[in-house]
Image (cartoon, rainbow, N blue to C red):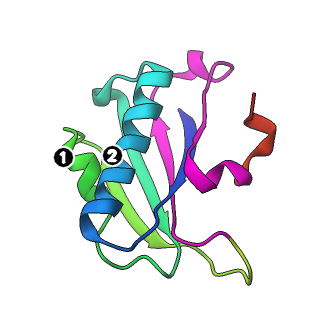
């Protein structure tokens, strides 16, 4: 099993915006890593405390990820940390990919992993 990470941010805590941004993030991770949806074991989602309009897991279900376990949690609050941030950790069944994983950080979440910027 491997894990793939990603994060994104939104401007406003609106149901449609949160779900749309989560969908874009998941689609980017799936495409960048050429994932088979049936091999996704679980996805953990976290949101900062300022995001309360929707469960990001709904975006995964809307994409057809129906056999994986999905968990939504609140991100630990750290003073002056990135606001309106959605993070994901995908647990995937494919050991051969461990050296080829492409983590995805979008929007203001790019600052979380400057080492991944090209």
Q: Residue at x 30, y 72 (%)?
A: 14
Left or right: 70 with respect to 82?
left
The answer to whether any part of residue 66 appears in the image is no
The image position of residue 113, as x and y in percent, is 74, 47
Instruction: Indicate yes or no whether the magenta region holds residue 1.
Output: no
Range of magenta residues: 82-111
Q: Nearer the viewer, residue 16 or 73?
A: 16
* Residue 23 image label: 2
Which residue, as the protein is rendered here, is positioned at the far front? 11
Which residue is the site of mark 1? 62
Q: Residues within 10 Å of mark 1 (few under 14, many from 20)?
A: few
Left or right: 45 with respect to 65?
right
Mark 2 or mark 1: name the one nearer the start of the chain: 2
Q: Residue at x 37, y 42 (%)?
A: 24
* Residue 90 image label: none
Please tell me whether residue 47 is drawn above or below residue 26 in the rendered image.
below
Please tell me whether residue 108 is drawn above or below residue 113 in the rendered image.
below
Q: Secondary structure at mark 2?
A: helix
* Quadrant in the rendering for residue 65: top left
Label 2 with label 1: CB-CB less than 8 Å: yes
Instruction: Indicate yes or no whether the magenta region holds residue 93.
Output: yes
The image position of residue 41, as x and y in percent, is 38, 40
Q: Residue at x 56, y 38 (%)?
A: 4
* Quadrant in the rendering for residue 106: top right
């Amino acid at each position: 099993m491997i894990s793939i990470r990603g994060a994104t941010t939104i401007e406003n805590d609106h149901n449609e915006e949160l779900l749309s941004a989560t969908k874009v993030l998941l689609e980017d991770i799936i495409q960048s890593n050429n994932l088979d949806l049936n091999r996704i074991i679980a996805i953990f989602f976290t949101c900062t405390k300022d995001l309360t309009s929707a469960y990001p897991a709904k975006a995964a279900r809307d994409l057809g990820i129906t056999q994986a376990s999905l968990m939504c949690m609140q991100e630990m609050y750290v003073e002056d940390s990135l606001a309106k941030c959605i993070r994901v950790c995908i647990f995937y069944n494919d050991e051969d990919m461990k050296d080829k994983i492409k983590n995805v950080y979008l929007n203001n979440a790019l600052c979380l992993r400057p080492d991944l910027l090209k």
